Image (cartoon, helix red, strand yellow):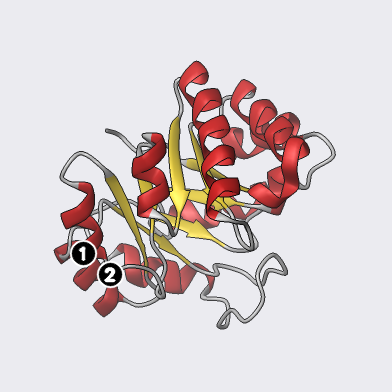
């Protein structure tokens, strides 16, 4: 499966408005939606992921689930993105099998190479720029940090953290395959317009 260049992350705590933002982003051409669900029960995550997957299927888009390979497999999502504190990637690959997209999170080339060896299909790398979406993050890598990771592996690198349409060209020049956004789409007054602007920058 080819990996789209724009990953729109959404939080299950947003309830119906979050689904509205997903629908708008998909209608505007978003190729990948990642379900993030911090502070939700398993049932809430499951129901939200099912709803997002249904929207993605109708739009022909890829659906990923953040952190939870069990939820991703339970709803039939296309893949799972794993962070440093989640199930080890090699273990997730054993559980999910070869057909399930697995993403890992890396900030430096050594870990990036290790995750690819364990079965990562792509890597999320960041924060590329300072961001307020998530607390407790390490310092921003900047395009040079993205380039160091992208140059070390042969899988797609998705830059995340503080991404705007204006910053996309610099990230692509650094070797990123694409970008992942949270607030840039889900918190936008017009998620569809924000999606179109990002897609135009990625072309």
> Horizontal and vertical percent for residue 120?
25, 57
The numbered dot on residue 188 is none
Residue 144 to residue 98: above or below: below
| Residue at image point 63% right, 21% down | 27
Query: Tags 2 and 1 in contact by the CB under 8 Å rule?
Result: yes
| Residue at image point 71% right, 35% down | 21
Q: Secondary structure at mark 2?
A: loop
Q: Residues within 10 Å of mark 2 (few under 14, many from 20)?
A: some
Locate residue 51: give its quadrant. top right
The numbered dot on residue 88 is 2
> Horizontal and vertical percent for residue 83?
42, 67
Q: Does the image show residue 177? A: no
Q: Is residue 157 left or right of residue 195?
A: left
Q: Is residue 32 left or right of residue 15?
A: left
- In the orientation shown, which residue stands out farthest toward the right? 189
Q: Is residue 128 left or right of residue 192?
A: left
> Horizontal and vertical percent for residue 104?
34, 62
Locate residue 88: give its quadrant. bottom left
Q: Nearer the viewer, residue 38 or 199?
A: 38
In this figure, which residue is indicated by the disc labeled 1? 91
| Residue at image point 69% right, 64% down | 133
> Horizontal and vertical percent for residue 115?
24, 67
CA gap between label 2 and label 1 equals: 5 Å
């Amino acid at each position: 499966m080819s990996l789209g260049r724009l990953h729109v992350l959404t939080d299950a705590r947003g309830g119906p408005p979050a689904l509205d933002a997903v629908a708008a982003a998909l209608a505007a051409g978003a190729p990948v939606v990642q379900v993030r669900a911090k502070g939700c029960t398993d049932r809430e995550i499951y129901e939200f992921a099912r709803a997002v997957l249904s929207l993605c299927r109708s739009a022909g888009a890829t659906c990923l689930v953040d952190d939870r390979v069990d939820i991703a497999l339970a709803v039939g999502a296309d893949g799972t993105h794993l962070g440093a504190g989640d199930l080890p990637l090699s273990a997730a690959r054993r559980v999910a099998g070869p057909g399930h997209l697995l993403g890992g999170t890396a900030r430096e080339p050594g870990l990036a190479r290790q995750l690819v060896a364990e079965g990562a299909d792509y890597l999320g790398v960041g924060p590329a720029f300072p961001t307020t979406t998530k607390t407790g993050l390490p310092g921003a890598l900047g395009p040079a940090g993205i380039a160091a990771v992208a140059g070390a592996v042969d899988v797609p690198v998705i830059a995340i953290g503080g991404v705007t349409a204006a910053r996309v060209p610099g990230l692509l020049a650094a070797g990123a395959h694409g970008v992942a956004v949270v607030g840039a789409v889900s918190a936008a007054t017009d998620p569809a317009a924000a999606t179109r602007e990002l897609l135009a920058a990625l072309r």
